[in-house]
Image (cartoon, helix red, strand yellow):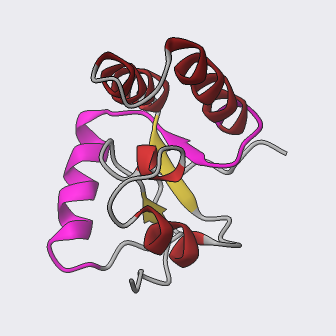
Amino acid sequence: MELASSPVYLDASALPKLYVSEARSDELEAALLGRRDLIVSALAPSELASAIARRAREGEMTSIGATRLYRRALHDLERGEFWRTEPTERVHRVGWHCVRPMRCTSRSPLIREPAS
């Protein structure tokens, strides 16, 4: 898997792959290894909770395992492993512009620096 050299936005389908083994999880993890320019929505904790809870409901993991996994993911989000962006109209417009020509840059004003 090859990713852009600019920041990488992890949407609700990609972010859970870093915490739950599923198709292409290993490939995504290898492509992201060592990167410090990963962007997630401020809604990521809710999106992750939903994805993990679904797996627990479907019997892919126990509720205890789901709780531990969610806590680990939340810890990563809180300690600044990912840059966060608010899902504003402007962010959606810039995001749409980025995916069409694949030209998003780190100078984009919608990106916040990760917590130190």
Q: In this view, does 64 lie above or below 112?
A: above
| Residue 116 on the magenta span | no
Seen in the picture, residue 14 relative to 84 is either above or below; the reply is below
Image quadrant of residue 3? bottom left
Q: Position of residue 13 (x, y in %)?
A: 30, 47
Q: Is residue 101 magenta?
A: yes
State the residue at coordinates (47%, 55%): 109
Which span of residues is magenta-colored? 77-102
Point out the residue furthest to the right here.
116
Residue at the location (69% across, 39% down)? 76
The single residue placed furthest to the left in the displayed view is 100
**68 sits left or right of 19 in the view:** right
Where residue 52 sits in the image (x, y, percent)?
42, 27
The image quadrant where one finds the C terminus is top right
Quarter of the rendering occupied by the N terminus: bottom left
User: At 72% from the left edge and 30% from the top edge, which residue is drawn?
Assistant: 75
Q: Give 57 or 101, whichever is nearer the viewer.
A: 57
As drawn, is 49 to the left or to the right of 69?
left
Position in image of residue 14 (x %, y %): 37, 53
| Residue 58 x, y percent position in the rendering | 27, 23
Q: In the picture provided, is 30 more to the left or to the right than 35? A: left
* Residue at 35% across, 28% down: 55
Q: Total marks drawn?
A: 0
